[in-house]
Amino acid sequence: MAKVTLKGVQKSYGPVKAIHGVDMEIQDGEFIVIVGPSGCGKSTLLRMVAGLEAITGGEIVIGDRVVNDIEPADRDIAMVFQNYALYPHMSVYENMSYGLRIRGMDKAGIEQRVQRAAEILQLQKLLQRKPRELSGGQRQRVAMGRAIVREPKVFLFDEPLSNLDAKLRVQMRLEIKRLHQQLGVTSIYVTHDQVEAMTLADRLVVMNLGRADQIGTPQDVYNQPATTYVGGFIGSPAMNFVKCKVEPGSGGPKATLADGTVLVLPADWNVPASTYTLGIRPEQFRLARPGETPHLVLSVDVAEELGADTLLHGKVGDEEMVVRVPSQSGYHDNSKPGLVLDVARSHLFDTESGLRVAV
Amino acid sequence: MIERRPIADAVGHATLLLAMLIVAFPIYLAIIAASHTIQDLSSFPMPLLPGAELFKNTAQALFEGPQIAGVARATPALLLMLNSLIMAVSIAVGKIIISLLSAFAIVYFRFPLKNFFFWMIFITLMLPVEVRIIPTYKIVADLGLLDTYTGLVLPLIASATATFLFRQFFMTVPDELVEAARIDGAGPMRFFWDVLVPLTRTSIAAMFVIQFIYGWNQYLWPLLIASDNRYQTIVLAIGRLVRSTDAFYEWPVIMGMAVLALLPPVLVVVLMQRWFIKGLVETEK
C-alpha cells in the first residue's frame, strides 16, 4: 500500500499534447476513479502510472519512489485490462501464478497466494480451466486474481467492466468495491461509465481533453461541479444549461432567461451583473402544486416513462430542457406542466470559461 | 448457395473424381511396378494389377539399393532416406526458428530501417533457390561446406514465407497481452517463449508440414552440393538412377525406392493434418 503522487504529469505524441499536466495526490488505500469520455486521456494517464507509456513531463511517485524510469514490473503495481489479457494457453492457476514464477518465488509460496486469491474471488473450482472455457465474468475475476496474487502497492483498473453485460457489470462493480474494502489497497480505476465512477470512488477525477477538470468526492463533483463540462458529464440525464442575464434586484439577484422568464436567485448569492450560464439538474425541478405560481412552463415534446420516474423532454422558450418528475404524474407528450425550481441548488457558470462562479 | 442442383453436383463430383484419378494413377503405377519381378514388368502390356513381390523389392531397395549393371553398387535407400530426413527436418526446424525470431523482431521491436528490412525479406519471397544458385554455390564452396550436411541445409534455411506468416500471426496478438507480460515482469525472450511460441504452435505445425515437404523434395541444391554418395538424398538418387544411360534398369527395385521416398512426406501430412488445417484457418486467441 502506498501513496501515489502525480506532479505536473504531461504526455505528448509528437506535437500533439494528450495530457496537459495533471497534479494529484492519492492517499494510501484510497479508491480513485478517473472518468471521462473516449479520448480524454484517462487511459493514457493510467498507463503512465503503470509504466506502459513513457512520461513526457512531470513526475509520478509511488510510495516514496519516483517511478518515471522504472519498468512496470518493478513499480509494485498490478493492472487489470479491459479485455482481461489472460494468457490463452495457460490455465487459470498458471495465469495467476505467472508473475510470481518469473519473480522466482518458491512453489509453496505461490500455491498459498493463488489459493488465497482464488478463495477471495471464488475461483477455487476453476483453477485448472483455460480462459476460453470461462464466462466473461469469470475471466474478469481471474484477471483480478492475477493482480491480487502480486500483493501490489497499487491496483490499476483500465475499464475492467466494459466488456461485460449490464447485469454482470453491476455485480462485478459490487465485488470490486467489496474487494477494495477487504484488501484496502490504493486503487486507480479508469472508466467512462459515470455510475461506476460515482459508486466506486472515494474521490473522482473528471478528465476533459487531457486536463483534470475536477478532483473531488462523488458528492462534491455532483453537487459542486467545477465546470460546465463536469456538470454535463456527471449525472444522467445531463444537467440543463440555460443562458441568463443576472442583474441585482430586490429579494435577490434576478436572472432573466432568453424567453423573458425571470428567476429570482437566492438573496445571499453575491454575483456581479453579467451574462452567465445557469446549470439546473433535471431533478431540481418539481411540478408546481395547484395554486402555486410556476417558475417556468415546459412544453413537453416527449415524455419517457422509466418506471420509477418520468423524464419530460421539452423546451422552455428556445432552450432544450429535461425534467425528472415522479412517475404517473399525468404528463405526456405535448402537455405544458408548470415547474418550480429549487434555485438554491442550481449552479452558476461563467459563460466564457465554463468555470463555476462562486456565490 | 442454398439451392440444390443435382446435375451441377454430379458434374462437380465427376470432375473431382477424374482429377483424383489423374493424380493418383502414377502413384498406383509405381506401387504396381514395385510389386512384380523384372521379367513380368518387361512384358507387354505392363501388368496393371498388383503382383507378389512388393515386399521383397522394397526391402531390397531399402537395404541394398537397385543393382545397376556396369555401375558401382548403389547406395541403399535407408542411408538416402536418412540423409533426406536430416535435410528435411533441419530445414523445417531451422526455418521455423529463424522465421519466428525474425518475425518477433519485426513485430515487437523498434529499430532503424525496420520496414526496409522487412520488405527486403519480403522481396526474397519472389526469388526461388534457382535464381541465386550460382552465388550461393560459390559461397558454400568457399566455406568448404561441399559434401556436408551444413552445406545441404544452411543456404535453404531462411524463409520469407514463414517469416511473413508468423509476422501476420503476431500482429493479431492483442497488445494487452504484451503489456500484461511486462507487468508480470517477463522480459522480451521470456514473453517470446512463454506466451508467443505456445500461441503460435498451430501455425508452427502448419509451417513444419510445408517446409518438411519442401526440404524433402529438394533436388537441384543437393545435386550441386552432394557429389559424395554418402550425402545423397533419396530424391536425388532416384533422379540419377533414372537418368543413367546404358544401364540395365532394375525397375521394380527403383519403383520400390520411389514408393519409399513417398512415405515420409505422406506420413507427416497424415499425422499432422489436423494441426495443419487448424494452423492455416484458425487463430486461437
Image (cartoon, coloured by chain):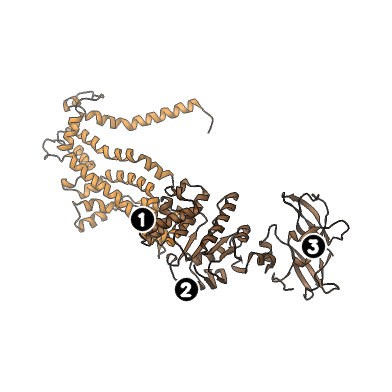
Chain colours: A brown, B orange
Q: Chain of mark 3?
A: A
Q: Chain of mark 1?
A: B
Left or right of B110 in this view: A291? right
**Is residue B104 among what the camera can see?**
no
Crowd class of label 1 (few under 14; some 14 to 19; many from 20; radius 10 Å) = few
Mark nearer the N terminus (2 vs 3)? 2
Do the residues marked 2 and 1 share a common chain?
no
Left or right of A108 in this view: B80? left
Crowd class of label 3 (few under 14; some 14 to 19; many from 20; radius 10 Å) = many
Task: Check disc 3 and give the amino acid type.
Answer: Leu
Do the residues marked 3 and 1 share a common chain?
no
Q: On screen, A280 above or below A300? A: below
- Of discs 3 and 1, which sits in the foreground? 3
Kindly check if marks 3 and 1 are in contact, taking CB atoms under 8 A apart as contact.
no
User: B42 or A109, which lies in front?
Assistant: A109
Residue identified by numbered label 3: A341
Residue A9 occupies which quadrant of the picture? Answer: bottom right
Q: On screen, A246 above or below B5? A: below
Residue identified by numbered label 2: A66
Q: Secondary structure at mark 1?
A: helix
Q: Residue at x 74, y 50 (%)?
A: A304
Q: CA distance from mark 2 to mark 1?
A: 32 Å
Which numbered circle lies on residue B225? Answer: none
Which numbered circle lies on residue B193? Answer: 1
**Is residue A221 among what the camera can see?**
yes
Q: CA distance from mark 2 to mark 3?
A: 50 Å
User: B83 or A213, which lies in front?
Assistant: A213
